[in-house]
Amino acid sequence: MLSAYLNCYKIPELRKRLLFTFAIIALVRLASFIPCPGVDPSVINSFMGKLGGQGTGGVLDIFDMFSGGALEKFAVGALGIMPYISASIILQMMTPVIPQLERMLREGEAGRQQYNQMMRYVTLVICVIQGAMFAVAMTKGEGDAGSAVRHAGFGFILMTIISLTAGAMLIMWLGEQITERGIGNGASIIITVNIIARLPVAVVNLIKLVASGSMTGDGNLSTIHLVLLMALFFAVTMGAIALTEGHRKIPVCYATRRIGGVGQTTTVQTSYLPLRVNYSGVMPIIFAGAILSFPMMFLRFLPSNRFVGYIISLLQYGSVSYVIIYGLLILVFSFFWVANQFNPIQIADDLQKQGGYIPSIQPGNATAEFLDHAMTRITLAGAIFLTGLAILPMILMNSLEVPAMIAHFFGGTSLLIIVGVGLDTLRQIEAHLLARHYDGFMDKGRIRSRRG
């Protein structure tokens, strides 16, 4: 495997793409350290802690993790790549419903460009809305050292919206440059790098906790607990890889005819139709978290009373009620995503047009029903496993009192994104290596010819 990494820099095109990707990542990380004008950085930290950030496991803490720590500094890159991801999800959900969008994707490169341009416009709208929400929140925010904004007013709100929107659109453009001229999907790599950027801080905090022998509460963190946590981390990572790569192979046969000197001969070629166990990826976790975050953000602006306090305690991150609702939403959205994106009728029609069939299954409606039934059973297993990975960080926070910054790396969206994007990027790099007769990451040797 080490030789494969060294071979990456021996191919000029691959080396150029890798270096370009690293340079763009450095620019994205730089946007996380340039604060927005008009705010007091010394007050932002305490203010974010009160709103549910700074390692508390709240909504802002998760948002801050996806932005690579830019939100806690209220930097120009505080919105990060998430508006672009949200716009992509919105258009993906609307494509099966709106025929114009589906027709646009089928028009080739020109239609794809129009679709991407529409995605940019949706991203711009989301940036303006989120930027306005954060700007208004900053004007009302007060930390332990006073007000978070030096001169609050309409001018500050307008300036903050422009700064945050410009930063997010710049990050979106940099992500597109990675996709076009670098390695991997740019948006996915940016959000992965932002998550990994929090890993060194989490490791340092974990070492400090072990050295002091204390955690956030009354529990104690000993060396044995550290070993168990590391073992659990590797086990959860292997489970996430199995969930990401797991699929069921449905055999598909194609009949071909050959005309020879004696007569016609018919041969059957067999291939496989892979049905992914986790077809929806991390989308159910993102949807469930977004659904539960909106009520909390809305309730904070209401006057405090007994009913509002009860709802806030019910939806408090990490509570038993939150875990139950969160898990049920993930299960529901897993099936919803598959029902929206997986079309067994179209797959059955395509197989029939290509002369393919599933053994022991009649072509047409019978094939569609078989694929629908098989996908439903696979989705159920994948959704249960996905739910377990999603709620594991909250279980660690409640049972072992593991800090939220550390617990996020033991499951949930963070681990699945890191695993999925890492595997996809390695596949693309390996494709470049194999195309130039180099060994991949799973083979030994420096250079090997395809002839032997």
Image: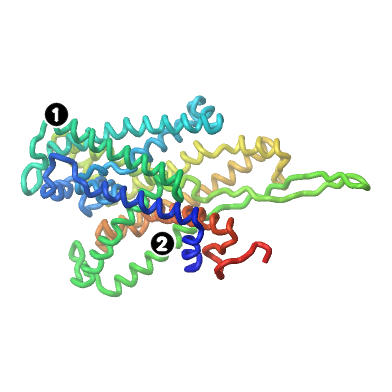
Mark found first going from the N terminus, 1 or 2? 1
Q: Where is residue 174 in the image (x, y as percent from the top left)?
A: 36, 43
Count of numbered labels shown in the rendering? 2
Q: How crowded is mark 2: few (under 14 residues within 10 Å), some or many (20 or more)?
A: some
| Vertical position of residue 214 compared to residue 141: above or below | below
Tell me the residue at 82%/44% (across/down). 257
Residue at which label 2 appears = 236
Residue 394 lies left or right of residue 149; in this view the side is right
Tell me where residue 123 sits by quadrant: top left
Q: Which colour scheme is used?
A: rainbow
Residue at which label 1 appears = 154
Q: What residue type is labelled 2?
A: Val
Q: Where is residue 355 in the image (x, y as percent from the top left)?
A: 73, 40
Can residue 156 be seen here? The reply is: yes
Of helix, strand and loop, which one carries label 2? helix
Q: Where is residue 218 in the image (x, y as percent from the top left)?
A: 18, 65
Can residue 420 be seen here? The reply is: no
| Nearer-the-camera pick, 43 or 385 | 43
Report the residue that reaches farthest toward the left. 146
| Vertical position of residue 200 compared to residue 287: above or below | below
Tell me the residue at 51%/28% (across/down). 104
Disc 1 vs disc 2: Cβ atoms closer than 8 Å? no
Nearest-to-viewer mark from 1 and 2: 1
